[in-house]
Image: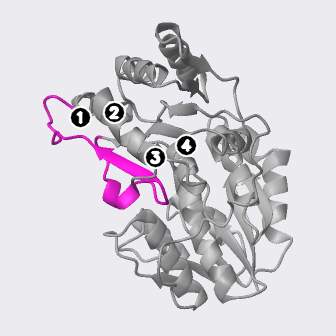
Amino acid sequence: MRVLVVKMSSLGDVIHTLPALTDAAAALPGIQFDWVVEEAFAEIPAWHHAVDRVIPVALRRWRKRPLRYLTGPEWRTTRASLRDRNYDAVVDAQGLLKSAVISRMVGAPHYGMDKTTVRKRLAALAYEHCVHVSKDMHAVERIRLLFARALAYPLPDGPGDYGVEDRVAPGEEKCSPGLLFFHGSSRTEKLWPEDRWVALAELAQEAGYRVWLPWGNEEEHQRAMRIAGRASAALVLPRQSLSELAAMLQTVSGAVAVDTGLGHLSAVFAVPTVSLYGPTSTRLIGTRGRNQVHLQSPMLADPVTGAAELMQSITPDVVWQALQSAVAGRF
């Protein structure tokens, strides 16, 4: 059986899809998946043993100059890749109009969430087979249930398995005692103030840890430089691929993250991680896996003070205590 998965972005959402493939591979021996994903995240599906082919797309880049790309060789190559294999099913795990369009380019039965539970109601019109999956579930469990119902196997009991832990070798250089600080997020309201990161790095230094600061764009690079400029224990990493970060994650003592995809990457490899949440719900999208600690802002959302106050209210001392417990295996 060959299934096309459409789950293009973002990093956390792509990671959330992995346990569903592990379930399916265990229930349906011999099943193989091809996966349509944004080029920036194409490394992730390739780690899973049940994924035969990754089909990268660049919709984020193409939308800046749509006429140029939609009439160019990249789009023609993508369309050819979607059509050069016969699929038994297409599962749209994204539920957006763009993913529905991609799904409809393939001549196979289409599965997705129904109009009451899909992210964009119009997307449900693209599916011959609509699956009801409650919105009141964690994202990982929603996708696991979607795949189980679409591909007709019983949903396994117990937590999901990302299925990639043994597919990415740890880095050769041990970075322990060391910590990774994932300080960047695509949304400003999810950021933790820089002075909080500096104070946390100072606590880490007092305990004998080195702090590593990754970055993915120039804004994050500049923030990392400012933090490192004020905290002598902190070092700014060269720009890393996701595979390089995954390898490094397996050699550090732990990590601290805001609500970002790299926090979910830590969960994949069971790295002791404290993730900080303000405006978002840990119950629905918190990191899932062993050694994961969630710190939700003690404040309630306030339309006057805004989300920045939510993150400000999480103190370095509280984060450090939680991280020490996570690293010691007390969570």
Q: Is residue 174 above or below residue 155?
A: above
What kind of secondary structure does the magenta stretch mostly adopt?
A: loop
**Cα separation between marks 2 and 1:** 9 Å
Is residue 84 magenta-colored?
no
**Cα separation between marks 4 and 2:** 17 Å
In depth, the one of 207 and 279 nearer the eye is 207
**Cα separation between marks 1 and 4:** 21 Å
Q: Which residues are magenta?
A: 278-306
Circle 4 Cα neighbour tier, 10 Å, few/some/many (<14 / 14–19 / ≥20): many
Is the C-beta separation of discs 2 and 3 under 8 Å? no
Q: Residue at x 65, y 63 (%)?
A: 102
Mark closest to the chain's N terminus, 2 or 3: 2
Q: Which residue is mark 3?
A: 328
Q: Which residue is mark 2?
A: 189
Is residue 67 rendered to the left or right of residue 135?
Answer: right
Where is residue 201? Give x, y as percent. Answer: 45, 21
